[in-house]
Image: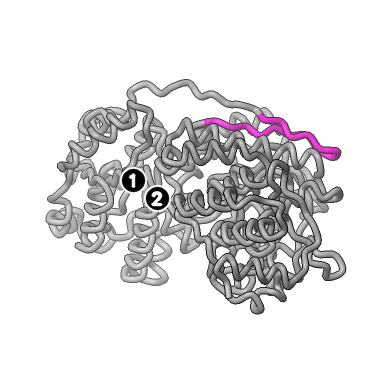
Amino acid sequence: MSDIAQITKIKESQAKGKAVSKPFRLYLGGFMAAGKTSVGRKLAELTGFPFVDTDDLVEAMAGMSVAEIFQKHGELYFRALEAEALEETFKLKNVIVGLGGGVLVNPENKAKIFANGTLIILDAAIETILKRASNEPGKRPLLKEESVAELMNRRREAYSKAHIRVRTDDLFVDEVAMSVIDMLADLFPEIKQPKKVETIPVKTANAEYPVLVGSDILAFCEDIMSEIVPKKFSSAFLVSDPLTFSLFSRNFKNLKGVHLLPRGERGKSLSRLSLLYEDLARNNVDRKGLIVALGGGCVGDTAGFAASTWMRGIDIIHIPTTLIAQVDSAIGGKTAVNLPEGKNLVGTFHQPCAVIVDVNCLLSLPDEEFRQGMAEVIKYGLGEDREFLSWLSENRDSIAERDPETLLKMVKRCIKLKASVVEEDEREMTGARSRLNLGHTIAHGLEALQGYGGIKHGDAVAVGMVVATHLAVILELESKGTLAELLYLLEHFGLPTKPCADFDSILPYVMRDKKFVGLKPMFILPREGCKCEMMEVDTDLLKKAYERAGGR
């Protein structure tokens, strides 16, 4: 099938209400100053897909500008980082990528781009390149080494093949972007639909705040924030990670400062927290300051902990960009960092001013990260709402295909379930909120055993739910039918169902679980016809359930 035929097929699928089944990635290539970044941003605005520039991603990863990288480490080091940044884009779905001028010179890079997306080359004459480059002094390190004509001649072959070519010399950015859309066989709608935002209130004894949910609302999140915290909006300090920052930071124009954490659990340590504190001090964030957490659960946990402790507590707004954060970690005010002895052992309760949830962020989420979030989604169905569990089974294909309307319904349902539990038991005093830890006791043990660098959180929660359900079946609290439905759903979304470690090795970590009191093994168990419940469980019985789940 030709690329244009594939594009047309995708558009027809979208028209029928189906999500793009194959990841769709647009790569904008060409010589420096050809307009890749400005056109990419415009395409993102027109289509609703996020835009990321490989140069921006390299800078975020390295913590310095491209010019500084060339000066301090040389071109070879830069090209290695560039290739690493490109690899990150292949993990994303439905994204627009602006390529650095030299990316396509590497045949391996170009082959991977053709294998993973659609390449659009933007052409421009030498005179146009020189005029545009002169407006950005110091930003083009290679222009200092040789003439534009010589460099363009060397790269001519690299730019010779593409799915689509557009000459940009005499066109405005809007015209180039619309030309690209026209050539893509009408992949994108020409008129964007009005944004609809639903507000889900969270009310606790100590706080009240809105969770705003919608599709493609990140583009005006600054307007939302300025209404929620008008006096603090100008002092917002952003905490994110390199990839998320590169994807979505263009939606933020007014920032006091930025701190980027490593992706994943590596960002949830006391040492990383200390570096974040240093940046808050360096940027003069005072008691009237505001932290904005843009990213997944690990970013939210660390940023939330920093907000709760900096100057004895400042405001925070969560903008979760992963499924696991949107449906769970961003709502409810839990914050924490890890210790070698266990996960989330150092933490606080600190409710945000607001949570802004854009489900369109999920369209570009790597498959593995989407899978992690589905474990938490299934947890709500198993532990809180069996009708929702049935809905997940009925809509499993649409969810897996990431149909936007289905995702919106799913995320909103999870948020409402989380909000109701948080309102019932904000600080885990009555045991109600502990229900949300269904599957997490075993999960945290598996994660801690592997130093938070092995099994992913969602995968661990999936295994933990299977163990908990086996235990509930043994205690005759749950039916084998529910266990079978759980196993089927987890397997459908590619989640593991068997423990990856022997019981005796994780037991010391399990016994440090925060729910345990006086070393009594307290466990959250699903119950047929009821919400899940915490109860004391004999260790030998827990081991039996663990072994029935396939553990050793």
Q: How far across and how far down the image is residue 432, in percent?
A: 79, 46
In the structure shown, which secondary structural element does the residue marked by tag 1 occupy?
Answer: loop
Q: Which mark is residue 23?
A: 1
Residue 40 lies in what quarter of the image? top left
Circles 2 and 1 in contact, beta carbons < 8 Å: yes
How far apart are the alpha carbons under marks 2 and 1?
8 Å
Task: Give the side of residue 24 with respect to residue 510, left or right.
Answer: left
User: Of the residues shown, which amino acid type is indicated by label 1?
Assistant: Pro
- Report the number of numbered marks: 2
Residue 138 lies in what quarter of the image? bottom left
Q: Which mark is residue 144?
A: none
With respect to residue 493, does 415 lie above or below? above
User: Of the residues shown, which amino acid type is indicated by label 2?
Assistant: Leu
Extent of the magenta region: 200-214
- Identify residue for label 2: 92
Name the front one of labels 2 and 1. Answer: 1
Quarter occupied by the C terminus: bottom right
Residue 261 seen in this snapshot: no
Residue 109 seen in this snapshot: yes
Q: How far across and how far down the image is residue 389, in percent?
A: 58, 41
Q: Specify the principal SS of the magenta part.
A: strand
